[in-house]
Amino acid sequence: MKNRRPILEGVKAAAHLHQEFDIRQQVESQWTRIDVFGTIVRENIPLLFRPLDNLLGAYLPRPNQGIIITTQRPLSVQRFTGSHELGHAAMGHEGSIDDESLLTRSPFGSKTYEPFEIAADSFATHFLLPRWLFVVQAARHKWSRQDLADPRVVYQLSLRAGASYQATCMALLRHELIDQATLSRLFAVEVKKIKQLLLDGHNLETWHPDVWVLTEADEGTVIEGDSRDAFILRLKETSGAGYLWNVDQLKEAGFVLFRDERLISDAEGDVGGPVERVVGARSDLSQLRQIALHQTRPWQKNGPPLSSFSFTFDLRGKESGRPRAERRHPVAA
């Protein structure tokens, strides 16, 4: 393959940064996304988010090294762009100005653009969407390899990885977790259609917000989304024994419930057994907040919960100005 050398260069550079900052351990211990902007800050590369006309981002090596990323695209695109520009910096490339083609280029390179861009594309995929991240998330949610052909599963995987649906599909192909025919089928499905299926009849004002489906497998996860996003909680509830999920914390955090029902399995022998509690919620508040829901018997005010489900909502959305990561990882003097 003509592009093998720059592709491998990007893979090697991404793996080096993963190891240097112990990124896999951080992701698995905190159940968060790979911290692209935090890595840029920790590399002492100045980072700014500004409106850019017809551009996604740029890497400037001199006279003063820096990265700039557009504020006119969603967080998932900002993250992929940041990963691409970080790749240029990590591999010592000359300056690069990147437009919309960054999002649609082949994951295996092309004769129409330079080797250093192929290397940065490879870095972006392997840094932001490494194979191990997909394997870890699939194991946690019990998604099989066959499930990765389901657009709904791939969409949920993309949300947890912090990348667009399209970028996630291409990364799955690059990591040989799907084949070309599956990629074509996944690309043929509109993301809007996936959201409509997940919402099951509930409409959004626009279809730009994401739709998250949260289950007990997301325990402890940091949900990095937008204030306009919709959330569908699907939790097993032992209502036959009097245990019910208390969703008051969602309401106290400013969430409005647009759905709350219990689905009973048609399987034999399930009478009196667990049901599925399905709760739909939206916030419209830009906030960072931990939520803990408990399954209790309402009449036992001080009784221990049968189970709990806790997670952190980070609904501050896309970045603007100086990166929030500077507060987590102060720039070294």
Image: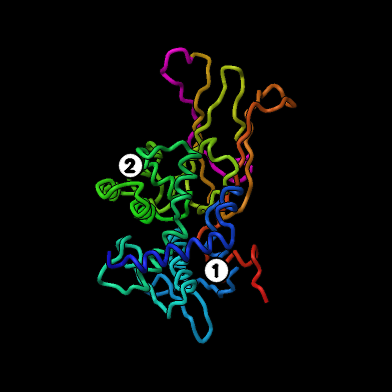
Residue at position x 48%, y 69% in the image: 86
- Residue 59 in percent (x, y) is at 46, 76
Residue at position x 39%, y 64% in the image: 8
Residue at position x 43%, y 13% in the image: 268
Residue type indicated by callout 2? Ala
Residue at position x 44%, y 60% in the image: 74
Give whichever of 49, 246 is nearer the camera: 49
Q: Which residues are magenta?
A: 248-270
Circle 1 sits in a helix, a strand or a loop, which is it? helix
Is 6 left, or right, of 22 in this rendering?
left
Q: Which residue is mark 1?
A: 40
Was residue 257 drawn as part of the magenta stretch in this picture? yes
Was residue 150 drawn as part of the magenta stretch in this picture? no
| Residue 73 visible in the picture | no
- Residue 103 in percent (x, y) is at 35, 63
| Residue 256 visible in the picture | yes
Q: Which residue is mark 2?
A: 149
Give whichever of 259, 148 is nearer the camera: 148
265 relative to 198, above or below: above
